[in-house]
Image (cartoon, rainbow, N blue to C red):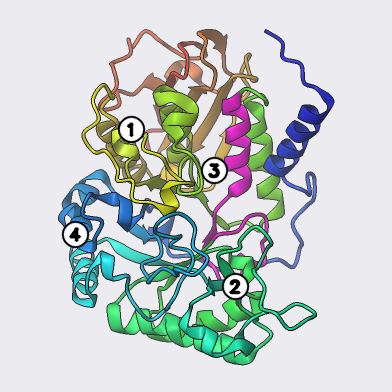
Amino acid sequence: MKRTLGKSALFVSLFAIWLAVGPVLGAATDSNATTRKSPDWLKKAVVYEIFTRNFSKEGDFNAITAKLDELKDLGVDILWLMPIHPIGQKVKKGSIGSPYAVRDYYAINPDYGTTNDFKRLVAEAHQRGIKVILDIIAGHTAWDSVLMEHPDFYKKDANGKIIPPVPDWMDVAALDYDNQEVRRYMIGMLKYWLKDFGVDGFRGDVAFSAALPFWEAARPELEQVNPEVILLADANANPKLLSKAFNMDNSGALNSALNLVMRGTAPAYLLNRSWENTSRQFPEGSLHLRFSDNHENVRAVVRYGLEGALAAQVLMLTLDGVPLLYNGMEVGDATDSADPALFEKLPIFWTAGGRPPLREVYGSLIKLRKENPAFSTQNVGWLQNTVPAEVVSILRSDDKNEFAILINFSSRMLAGSVEVPNAEQFTILDIGGMPAVPKSNLLPQFQLGGYEWRIYRRSLGK
């Protein structure tokens, strides 16, 4: 059925598409732009985001340590821990407050455990080959932060009153990076977590809220402690962040495009256009975090349904870049996320019934990704198909294999064909946890049920 929109709804929809595709559609990369070279292992990595408070009923570090073997078996390489610091109580949101309103950057939230508990978590993760990065909120603090003893550390209005970074964020106060003392304090703090606890890096929350020169000055100092420190920018469409400071950004434009497609307000080929626009903006070799679910959104299984959420994550696991899993995705957790879960105690429900074996499916896809270098290259071909408004078809390749991935982003059954060279040489793969597909389903023709997806392989015999 054709959808129609009123003028205001149409404006909102068009604005959302502009955000998803990017503000500089068609713009080419600055010929002088560069991106820092990241280690090969990072290109093959899988990131797993954890909200310690809601990861378990206990809500502490020890509960995470107890699940490290499961995470290792899943294929996780990097744990991204949402902020672990004490939470501000002045002007707090909800009954507990936001973990992004930090009271003391040098301390650990006592609800999560002791410093020894955290050191044990990091050490146990390292024993399993898993790295740990901390969420750092460099741009603002809680109103009862220990740094309030230094009012000159904060931005002020014309009347000399400390202000929040943006009007809606009333529970936090903006740090002033024009003050060199603020920069020195924050760099010292980052080095503390690297030296004393052995963490492997940081996610810079709202990375642009701290001046870019700060991050660029911090990187070489952090590398003196850990030459392979990982820096993830919570930012989108800013190649400068990846030039000297950060290893990767969060590819928010692609996620915005995904949301529009899954809501039915944009065709599936918007994903292609968003990806291509980002490729034009960024220098070759730039890394982007690929995600369909995180702490800033209602859970994907609630927004998209179980089958839709799986289809969305299949794209993230087969594209270039570094895929993210948000804690609980592997069991289809539908517990509230974002607001209000960010400010309350709402644990993941790990034993939900009636779910497909998502852990096995994601584990199989991660294994496929790790075992085949085609998925860690930047070779992404967007294949033409006869139903582009609903079906995404991509080709991942290296010198040994080609993989064709077809994903139906609609809820209805579709039949069509895809333009892929040597189509008759591709064979369909069985994915653990998914029903077997008859081998007679040969390309270039395809028939896909609602949110159904398939992966085909062609061996190049090298």
Mark 2 or mark 4: which is in front?
Answer: 2
Which residues make up the magenta segment? 234-263
Residue underneath mark 2: 173
In the rendered image, residue 376, in percent from the top left (x then y), is placed at 44, 48
The C terminus, quarter of image: top left
Identity of the residue drawn at 44% across and 18% down: 452
Compared across the picture, whether 370 is left or right of 399 comes to: left
**Residue at label 3?**
379
Residue 77 seen from this side: no
Q: Could you tell me which residue is drawn at 75 percent across and 35 percent down?
A: 12
The number of discs equals 4
Outermost residue toward the right? 7
Residue 417 is marked as none
Q: Are marks 3 and 4 in contact (CB under 8 Å)?
A: no
At label 3, the amino acid type is: Asn
What amino acid type is highlighted by mark number 1?
A: Gly
Q: Earlier in the sequence, mark 4 or mark 1?
A: 4
- Front-lying residue, 264 or 8: 8
Relative to 21, residue 3 above or below: above
Judged left or right of residue 293, residue 462 is: left
